[in-house]
Image (spheres, rainbow, N blue to C red):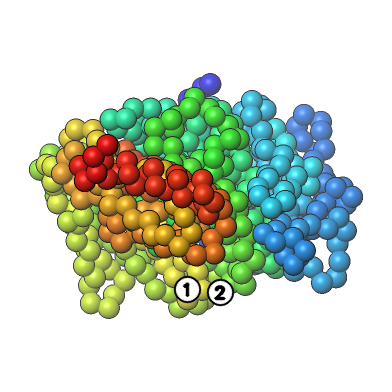
Amino acid sequence: MNRYYLQNLLLTGFLLFLLTAFDASGEEIKNPYHKIPTWKLWSSDPTPLSLPNNEVLIPPPVDKRIYPDDADTRDCPGRFLSYRNKDWSGRKYAGIWDDVYSNRDNGHRYIKPRWSGRNGNSVKIRDSIIHLKGGHLYEVGANFTSQSTRGMGHDIANNGPRMEQVEKFIYFGDILMSGPAHTSYMDLSTKSSIDRYEALVPIFYNSIGSSGSETMALTKMIIAGGYLPKDMKVKLKRNGLYPATLLYIWKASFPYKVPYANELRHRVAYNSKGDDSDCKGSNQTEVSCFYHNYDDTAHMRNMVNLAKSMTVAPPIALLKIMSITGDKRVYSLKTTVLVHQGKYETIKLRVSTEDGYDLQGLPLKFYWKVLYGNKNTTIMREGNSSYYNITIPYDSNLPKGRTSILLVTNNGKFESNPAVINVYRTEGAENLRPSLAGLKDITICPGKKVQFDITSIDPEGFPVDLYQWAGQVGSLDGNTFTWECPDDHADGTELVTIIASDGTRGNSYNSKQIKIHVRSTSDGWRAWWKTWTRKLKSLGSLKS
């Protein structure tokens, strides 16, 4: 495919921006680049649209529309998705009929028609949205695009002109762009990851995998967006903030026992479905698959619940770069900055947060987080002002790669999709994967205690952080995992999933999942005895 296809596509959107306005009210919106919506809003203008190929784009027929509702959890425990086929006067949630998906690879891969999870949670969405191949993005009112080709990963993230157009005319033009990371990020070697991203980019979606691996994420985001309150979804789309909100929901909803500003939530690329069953691609995650995987049903449930709660919109975090010294600046945008750091160079930035805003005018608080990279980075505020001085020293011990610094704003209700400063170390070795030992499958009886002393060593000598999936038994305290099995625990199997990170670059993680079998029968006692006699033998405390 022509490498300039996307740039020409975005330029088309830009020309439409100059020539066309689709908002009848003419009232100004809160958007960094647009004063009025230059994209079609189907909820306020459902007029059919004639396309250049002589086809007519129309909203889904009324009998094909589905209307989200609260699930009856009394009769259906664990259910969180519920839909009606007819509208009703007391409906709280927006629905999905006005969502527009535009395929940008001539149908090579297409948005997934259905999402399904545990406890009967399942919904078909394709016939209930507006979808097409191609089309002028603003004219058709596209909210979601996918392009399953090469060149959708680091080729965009590392390129200033392309990133500028994505920020101005896609992300803040109310379009959530997606594509596969493909060879930009792979975990094929036990030694280290392949990671060609110089920048962590918060404003578009990349998936781990090849063609089609990105499309299930769009299906999930459309489902979550349908559960936004009715007026809120209209407000977000009109102001061009629907993508920012959905990306925040996506990241905040991951079922990990970590804060929002943690490296597990903010990645260069994600599995679109938690077990990667939707698209294997080129098997890019055969090493450290449990870093990439997650509980997909829990993620979807969290997304829906977070969307339901949005009576106010999340705020918007924006960067205003006042100065950069000691650098080779690649680009400095409102949402993303990329600076190259050469050998022995210290990078200094003076940054203002003053351009960040809240759609409702709520007061904002800002905070910074060094996500990974050089932990000796300093961030100093100038008094009580919106100005900060950030210094990233050179560290010859660090591997080649990113120091990524998040800016997050909070309006008292929600946090924002972050803005990110990336300082890319152009010198250094590849980041090596830390070891992970001390975890194994075990059989116990109810009432027993499980304890694992986990050993994780980074080959380069950096400290290793351990994380656990949420929704699983037990807890981590440093390198020790402990679980007190209740006396009345039913026979069954509990999973424990641990992720190890050296915190230096945002790649080369290690991970492991084990099974704790709980057995109350005589077979369970025998299995428990076998497990512990093997352990004692290995310690030399019991002779065979």
Q: Residue furthest top?
A: 1
- Circle 2: residue type: Gln
533 to the left or right of 97: left
| Structural crowding at the residue carrying mark 2, measured as other residues with C-alpha within 10 Å and reported as few (<14), some (14–19) or many (≥20) | few
Residue denoted by label 2? 360
Residue 182's disc number: none
Mark 1: secondary structure: loop
Count how many numbered circles sit on residues in the image: 2
Q: Quadrant of residue 268?
A: top left
The mark found on residue 411 in the picture is 1
Instruction: Out of 461 and 244, give the one closest to the viewer.
Output: 461
With respect to residue 264, does 214 lie above or below?
A: above
Q: Position of residue 434 (x, y in %)?
A: 26, 40
- Marks 2,1: beta carbons within 8 A: yes
- The amino acid at mark 1 is Asn
Residue at 82% x, 51% y is 65
- Residue 200 position, x and y percent, is 37, 45
- What's the CA distance linking mark 2 and mark 1? 9 Å
Q: Position of residue 86 (x, y in %)?
A: 88, 58
Please determine whether, in this image, residue 358 is positioned above or below residue 35: below
Task: Please say if 25 is above or below 364.
Answer: above
Mark yes or no: residue 163 visible: no
Q: Is residue 62 visible?
A: yes
Crowd class of label 1 (few under 14; some 14 to 19; many from 20; radius 10 Å) = many
Instruction: Tell me where residue 83 sits by quadrant.
Output: bottom right
Q: Is residue 129 left or right of residue 329?
A: right
Residue at screen point 39% across, 43% down: 530
Q: Find residue 457 and report its horizontal and vertical position in percent.
A: 21, 43
